[in-house]
Image (spheres, rainbow, N blue to C red):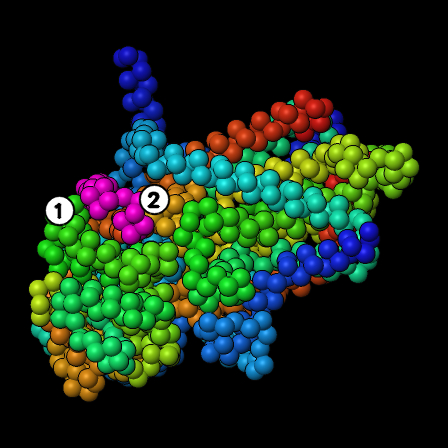
Amino acid sequence: MRRVLDALAVLIAAVVIFPIYWMVLAAIKPAGEIQSLHQRPWTLSPSLDAFRRVLAVNDFGRYLLNSLIVALVVVLISGLIAFLAAVALTRFHFRFRTTILVVFLIAQMVPVEALTIPLFFLVRDLGALNTLGSLMLVHTAFTLPFAIWMLRGFVAAVPDELDEAAQLDGASRLTVLWRILFPLIAPGLAATSVFSFIHAWNDFLFARTFIISATDRQTLPMALLVFFKPDENDWGAIMAASTLMTVPVLIFFLLVRRRLVSGLGGAVKD
Amino acid sequence: MKLRLATAAALALTLTACAPSTSTPGAAPSDGGARTGTLKVWLFDEPNRAPKEKVVNEAVAEFTAAHQGTKVDIAYIAVDTRSERFKGAFNDPASAPDVVEYGNTDLPEYAAAGGLADVGPAVTAWSEGADLSPDAKSSATYEGTLLGVPWYVGVRALYYRTDIFQELGLKVPTSIAELTTAARTVRAKKPELFGVAVGGKYTYAAMPFVWDAGGDITSLNSAQSRAGLKAYTDLIADDNCPPQQCADLTGGKTVDLFASGKAAMGILGNFNRAAVDAGAAKGKYAVVPLPGSKPGSIAPAFAGGNNLGIMKNSQRPALAADFLTLLAGKKYQSEMYDAMGNLPTLKSASAVVAAKDKFVEPFITTISNGTKFVPLDPGWGKIDASAVLPTMIEKVATGKSTVEQATDEAAKQVDAALTK
Amino acid sequence: MRQRFTPLWLLLPAAVVLGGLFLYPMYQLGLISVLDFRQAQVSGGQPTRFVGLDNYVQLFTDPQFWSVLLATVGFAAACVVATLAVGAGLAVLLTRISRVPRLLLSLAAMAAWAVPAVSGSTVWMFLFDTDLGFVNQLLGTEGFNWMYDRYSAFALVGAVVVWSSFPFVMVTLYAGIEAISRSVLEAAALDGASTWRTFWQIMVPMLRPVLAVVVIQSIIWDFKIFTQIYVMTRGGGLAGQNLTLNVYAYQQAFASSEYGLGSAIGVVMMLILLAVTVLYLRTLRRSGEPL
């Protein structure tokens, strides 16, 4: 029985990974093999031409860096703020607690396209147009509600007795927060950080709305968008660009993988 | 009732009092602004930008050599995101460039937003200004004001496979009827091929049929428009290009089909040459103007293309005009043809290009035969974005609606968008 | 005394960020939805005008809106159910297999999760391309256009949605199951309970808090699907047959700068989602699970 299930799991894994394999394959296939009526699931003459075309985008390194900076700052700030808010919402009972929770839910329901205009004026009035800071700010706001929702479960999973005991030992509230709660819910933070990272990393709606004239503050998705023209049908370049977009997220995933699995499980209360 | 009205009025008042903030269009300096400093220029990015960049850099070098103390800062913006970038520039004058390249179909929207400056005086003062054809000028004119200089145009014509035509003993079509017959013959004799590749999302291939029949976008449900549309959708049929495969094709996909050798004919632009030459059809094709319904006539083509304009917020309008006229001049128009295959808009430049390269002849013939354009109205943006025309073609091609129903529906949407 | 102030201090940073960047724009969203607000108004070319409920009337009298709404709800529901079923099924599978296959499956799932939506949609589109697609060549159905039929197009897009969103469900539920103490499950096994019964009668109740998060998030995300539809059906499919509300809003309003109308659609979408969620929260509360 177990063997059958093992085989099934491997088969499913293969199906799931296949599109990604195809993406990388198409990126390294020579042009003639892509526009072909007989697609082969391998290539005998891999070429990096497509990658070269994509990397020829001026300042590729700078755009990559910009995207990474934005995503990492968003992960840190939104994780921190969400942690504090999650503690408030689980450790304390006060009026409007449920209301606040529902507001966080509603916040996720607004179609973001609809908010671009008000946010544009807000950012302009702050004088933050054309800065990476504007992107960090809005992405922090957009990732917060979900992060708080997720972290709530993790904080709740840490028994109350733990911080009470610490307080009896004379620890201040702040100490309890940093020395006891924070390390315990670190896996949970890892799990939520994945979402924040992906969100900030993939965005180009706000990047193209806020970064109007400063070319050196562009983010990677905007720079790669020029290849996403189905009409040009340069599948090789599209797939190479996609691969390059995926790799950093994948690395991030692998870094937090262990904590992610144990982390997401922490949301279950015993 | 009275009370309710009063409440509504009060509500309206409060609402306008705290209405969302808007921009105040900045005033351009009346004396032409500073003659030194940095000139910001936006041009469209291309998947293969290097040749374009080379020509532009040459122009910049020439410009800065002639204008002491100036710098030109060129930014290449993605076509896909141009609309956000332009809106951003209109809304935040501080971020706005001085000179911009923009698609001529975007003109009415930008004009209505009040973002572009009148370049009429600059063109009058320009030595090559008189060389612009009236057709080209009118495509850059909105409500009587010239808001840009046409930089290049692109038109579509009929590409056909010489080898297949020879093998099947077909004549080059000189009318829509002949085109249709030739297409069906190819499909009948070589079922693995499409006669002429046409697509439901390929508006700019369909419109010449409508215009040729005497119809227009503003009168889609007229008898003429319907006849033209039917001539086109009749091609999306099993005996030429089956709806299952062709009803949702975009223009780019038909290029692909022709280039890869799956279609004997295609309605492609002068700008598609490189793509076709990269495929199996290379060296086995020729181009003629797309025929009209009358034998020997030419169907009016859509004159797509890009203009160069000056932003209203520019702080250096005089300098901007100097750079614009340099880049739009004969020298760089012909160089841009060599680099990107863009058809020049100046008569002198297109004569140079035509003398050099026989390939452009059918396209220039098409242009001189008269071209058509989308309605110069800010509502066009809405018609385009909500896919009114492709939806109409697709409904007919898939048999979801009759020509009458589909055109009535589309005409209603066009009217609603244009009168708003 | 201190006790009362602490939650406020802790909530303050979140309140500042969300109040400024969310509540205020949301208030503006409602405001714009009753105005005639287009690009000309934004850039100050024309004054804004109060139009009352005109934008909403225009929306509700458009027959296409209703059919798009219906399609959206149906498509989102199908995606939610499929994602949950696949995710939950694979989560249970993960608990019953050896280490190496488990590692392979979870790595594959995470890779699918990591692929940006634009890239994922594009590669699937390429795999299912009419002429150049590997799938058609594999099945010997060359020339079959998956996007021609409304339902096959929706099914294909749905498959991509499930592919990219099941990993979240799978990993979360798997982690949840792992957290349930072994002894409980072993006791159930000793009692001779079948896998099916263990799943429904022990795991599901214990996993309810996690399930709640997963279900609510899936509803919110799948209702707002944009990229997959927009990219794969080239903006709504043949004659608009595959339009969903978000893409429809984008086409009708945002792409042509009709912000008044767009905001109205945004408000309507928000209200629908809110209704669904509140309904779900009610059932949760009735079954004894406080928020």
Q: Does C30 lie within the magenta span?
A: no
Category of crowding for the residue at label 2, using alpha-carbon neighbours closer than 10 angstroms: few (below 14), some (14–19), many (at least 20): many
Query: Disc 1 is attached to a residue of which chain?
Result: B
Extent of the magenta region: B394-420
Kind of element beneath mark 2: helix
Q: Amino acid at mark 2?
A: Gln
The N terminus of chain B is located in which quarter? top left
Q: Which residue is mark 2?
A: C252
Between B164 and A62, the one lying in front of the other is: B164
Majority secondary structure of magenta residues = helix
- Residue B342 in the figure: left or right of residue B297: right
Kind of element beneath mark 1: loop
| Residue B170 screen position, x and y as percent | 20, 76
Q: Residue at x 32, y 50 (%)?
A: B398
- Residue C156 in the figure: left or right of residue B274: right
When the figure is inspected, residue C136 is found, relative to residue B159, above or below; the finding is: above
Q: Residue at x 88, y 35 (%)?
A: C192
| Residue A175 screen position, x and y as percent | 80, 43
Between C4 and C154, the one lying in front of the other is: C154
Q: Residue at x 32, y 71 (%)?
A: B190
